[in-house]
Structure formats: C-alpha cells, structure tokens
Image (tube, grey):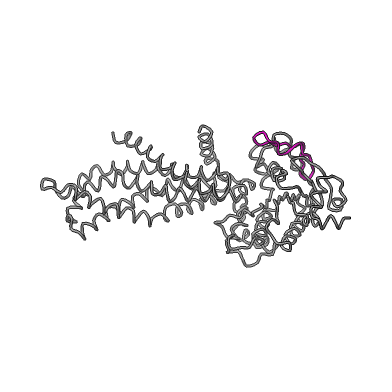
Amino acid sequence: MIKSLGKYVLMLYHIFFRPEKFSVYWRRFLDEVIQLGIKSLFIVTLMSAFMGAVLVIQTATAIESAWIPDYTVGFTVKQSMLLEFCPTIISLILAGKVGSNIASELGTMRVTEQIDALEVMGVNSIGYLIGPKIIAALFIFPIVIMYSMFFGFFGGGLVCYFTEIISVKQYLLGIRTFSGDNYEFIKYALTKTIVFAFIITSISSYFGYYLKGGALEVGKASTNAVVYSSIFILFANYILTQLILI
Amino acid sequence: MIKVNNISKSFLGVEVLKDISFTFEKGKTNLIIGKSGSGKSVLTKCIVGLFEPDNGEVYYDDRKFSVLKPKEKKEVRKEIGMLFQGSALFDSLTVEENVAFPLRMFTSMSESEILERVNFCLNRVNILNNNSLYPSELSGGMQKRVAIARAISLRPKYLFCDEPNSGLDPVTAIVIDELIQEITIEYQMTTIVITHDMNSVLEIGENILFIDNGTKKWEGNKEQILDVKVKELHDFVYVSKFLKKMKK
C-alpha cells in the first residue's frame, strides 16, 4: 500500500519535468482533449438527457400536491443536476469510459514495449504519455460537465413538452428560481469536476503504466482503474461537499 | 564501442547475470546468444539503462554510464537506436509518424527536412509507399523494417536489436539480418543483436558473446563457433540430430 502510494507520487512528480519539446506535447494535449472529452460527448448527452427526463417524472410524481407549486419540479431538477447528477454521476460514467481506456492503452503500451522504446530514446515516458492526459482532462471535463447540465435541463424540458406532466413554462420558471445561488452551485460542481478529472486520469494512468504481465493483466488493470477511480470519486465527493457547502 | 565490465544483476535474490565482461566493437554486428532465460535481454536492458546493474560498469566509448548525470544519460540515449522483439511501433501513429517521432522530439528540423529524412530511412529499409499505414496494417517483417527505420532516423552510434527475426519466416529473417549488417557497416555503428537463431549467428556473427545461465561461457566469431569445445555452446549449436550427424 505504502509502496503503491510512493510509486503514484513519483509518477506525479515526473509529470512536472520539463518537456523535451513543447510543440510535440501540445499536439499530444490536443489529441487527448479529443480522445477524453469530445469522444465522450455522445454518452454524456444520452446520460444527461435521460437523467433530466427521469428526474422530472420522479419529482413530479413524488410532490403531486395542491399545496406545492409546479415550478418546484423544475427547481428540484436543477438543484439535483447541478449539485450531484452532472458532476458526480457523469464523472463516474467517465471513470468507466475514460478510465478503462487510459489503463488499457498504457497497459498495452507497456506489454508491447512501446514505453520501453520511449525510455530508450530518452523521452520522459510519464511526462509524454500521462502529463497531457491529466492536463487535458482538467481542461475539458468542466466543459463536458457544463454541456451535461444543459442537456440534463433539455431532457427534462422535453418530457414536460411531450407528457405535459407540468407545463414547460412552470419547468423553466423552476429552473430560474433562486438563480442568485446558481453561480455558487456551478462553482461547487466545477470544483468537484476538476478534482474528479485528476482522480480518474491519474489513477487510471497509474494502473496502466505500472502494469506487469500480459493481456490478462491489461484487463485487470482496466477493471482496477475503474473501481479505484470510482471509490476515490465517492470519497472526494463527500469531503468536498462537506468542505464547500457546509 | 560499448564495454561492459563485471556486470551482475539479481531479481528477488535470484542472480540472473553473473560477472559478465565483454567489448562490443564499432562497425561490427556483435551478437549476444544463449538459450531462452539465459539473461540476454536482461544484459541488454542493463546496457541501455532500463535496468540498473547491481555491480559492474557500462562504458559508451569512454563514458562511464553509471556516473553520468540524468541529462548526460539522456544525451547518450539519443545516440541509441533500439529494435524491440515485437517492433514496439506506436500503435496510434502511422508509419511516417513513427519514423518521424525521434526527429520531431529531439531535433529542430523543419517538417520538409523531417519528411525527407523519413523517406530516406524508409527507402533504406525498402518500405515504399506505405507512409500512411498504421502498424497493425503491416506484416511482421514490414513492422521490423519500419522499426529499423525509426531506430536509424537519428543516425545513432549504437544500435540494439532484441531478437530481430523472431516470428519471421527464414527468408525474411535473413533479409532483416543482412539489412542490420549493411547499415552497421554503412553508418559505422556499434550494433548489438540478441538472438538464439543459429541462422543469424552464422550469417552476421562477427563478434559473439555466449551466455548460459547468466554466465559468460564463450566469446568468438561465426568461423570459430562451429569447432567450439565448450559443452554448453556445443549443445546449443548442435541441438538438432541433423546437425550432429553432419558434424560427424
């Protein structure tokens, strides 16, 4: 455990070494933005829109009362999406998609000696392979989460439009209610996202980069990356919520 | 020239290399031969610095590798080209990008100069009109050639080849061996080839180190190896009944 932690810290330390050539690292960063962020948009859109839609139906059913105004549904959906569903649930989904992708990519590179090839050439393999992934995730994940928020609200709006469970007008009114707090909530959500982005990319990279063995171990590393990233996301979520919201 | 002096290396208390000394000569194809698990790859990884030896020293010409600063070690590594057993081409890059990789990373050449050098290296290994293919689209022999092109792109002083013809048919294997020998002479490199293929030994073995069970048992060249008296090497060379009969 302590040995693993030491290796993880050393890995992070190597990321901050001076790049051999900035232009090559910049290209790697752009590639990773596409790989980790842009290529995740489809699943994020689907997840967010359906989460928003289901939340509207569940909330409207749960608070069906003459004493509670309809716009409460919109307000509840907004709070849930901003505070928890978009930053945390979408990050857990990304831990599955992006985390397993990173671990298996680096693990395969280890097994097929591509990492050794980089080291023999004199390239800082950690800086070259892992650094751009972490920086790209820190940059693109907050954008992905804001995109997810939009599609979450949009999905909820579509349900209102097609089922008339509440009117779209009331739903939008609910979303705009207490909008003065929105800035703080978005700040909180994006802070969480940045921490989660770091957790997902660094833990998955650790499992892939230090892999020993063959194809079977690549699969195990991929699973471990998802499991450990998810566990640490849940811990970080609790700690950050306590620190920021209370 | 690369010189190793009294190299030893252990893993979890098991001694894999025992006190190995040898000089790999410039402009020659130097072979490290031995059975699987004899320590050939470990010795090579100690030489290139992927493993740190427990004892002993590695000299690149007059430079003692262990006392060099990290920056100086990086400079030495830029003078090394390595061909890995599985080629180790970068999956996500095309043939052209693979060969251009060291040039983009370590030189200030313009894109047109890089492209010119890449095409020269690919022509040298007889890979023509395949620049935009990915490694997975190439045959094993072609992957080896591209890996050689990448290894020589920075005009290295030292070339390491880890079982360059493993997994190849005998004809392609000899073509790869000959290519390695040709470029060694052409660029006056110190080339080290790890192999357990007797065809390679008899084809390009100008300076041979035989390792058995982590210990140096013999050194010589391809002319001397057929008359060798060392039992372990004799058993290695004359492993087939056919060759044993031929010798008698």
- Residue B123 counted in the magenta span: no
Q: Using the image, determine if residue A1 lies above or below residue B183.
A: above
Residue A30 image offset from top left, x and y in percent? 47, 53
Q: Using the image, determine if residue A172 lies above or below residue A199.
A: below
Tell me what residue is drawn at x 34 percent, y 45 percent. A87
Tell me what residue is drawn at x 11 percent, y 45 percent. A67
Q: Is residue A165 left or right of residue A114?
A: left
Q: Is residue A23 left or right of residue B39?
A: left
Residue sitting nearer the eye, A30 or A105: A105
Residue A53 image offset from top left, x and y in percent? 26, 54
Q: Using the image, determine if residue B14 lies above or below residue A95.
A: above
Kindly give the residue lying farthest to the left in the view shown.
Answer: A66
Q: Main secondary structure of the magenta part?
A: strand
Residue sitting nearer the eye, B35 or A164: B35
Q: Is residue A70 left or right of residue A137?
A: left
Residue B40 image offset from top left, x and y in percent? 72, 45
**Residue A192: which quarter of the image?**
top left
Which range is magenta? B1-23
Report if residue A217 is visible in the image. yes
Report if residue A198 is visible in the image. no
Tell me what residue is drawn at x 25 percent, y 50 percent. A55
- Residue B6 counted in the magenta span: yes
Kindly give the residue lying farthest to the bottom in the view shown.
Answer: B129
